[in-house]
Amino acid sequence: MNDPAHVEYRIAHLKERLAAEELGELGIRVEPRGSSVAVVGTVPTAHCRDELLRTVNEELDGETVHFDVVVAESAAPDHPEELA
């Protein structure tokens, strides 16, 4: 990992970019964790996750990034629920 101050700057720039794009409303947290950066949160679709991963990888190229991003698909169930 680079200089901690430089990493903080890169994280701040990433947060600004996310806020300016559609991804800004997702409530994703990006924070330094030891010698890496953690990206944590829930996104509504796999497409949003892919866009987030692409953006993070562009902005934090060269850093070790750990993604803990969950997709909360809200698709209708493919079968009826059986109640006992």
Image (cartoon, grey):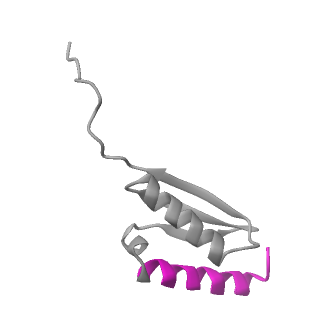
Instruction: Tell me where residue 56 appears, x and y as whole percent.
Output: 59, 70
Looking at the image, which residue is at 36% across and 72% down? 25
Q: How many marks?
A: 0
Image quarter of the N terminus: bottom right
> Is residue 61 rendered magenta in the image?
no
Residue at the farthest top position: 84
Q: In this picture, is 60 found above or below 13? A: above
Q: Between 12 and 54, which is closer to the camera in this rendering?
A: 54
Is residue 14 visible to the viewer in this orientation of the structure?
yes
Q: Between 5 and 59, which is closer to the camera in this rendering?
A: 59
Instruction: Tell me where residue 82 appears, x and y as whole percent.
Output: 22, 17
Left or right for 50, reference 77: right
Left or right for 83, reference 53: left
> Is residue 8 rendered magenta in the image?
yes
Looking at the image, which residue is at 49% across and 58% down? 49
Q: In this picture, is 80 found above or below 39? A: above
- Look at the image and give the residue range highlighted in magenta: 1-19
Residue at the farthest right position: 2
Left or right for 76, reference 35: left
Looking at the image, which residue is at 38% across and 73% down? 22
Image quarter of the C terminus: top left
Instruction: Tell me where residue 74 appears, x and y as whole percent.
Output: 30, 46
Instruction: Tell me where residue 64 appears, x and y as whole percent.
Output: 74, 65
Is residue 31 visible to the viewer in this orientation of the structure?
no
Looking at the image, which residue is at 23% across and 23% down? 81
Left or right for 22, reference 3: left
Q: Main secondary structure of the magenta part?
A: helix
Q: Between 52 and 39, which is closer to the camera in this rendering?
A: 52
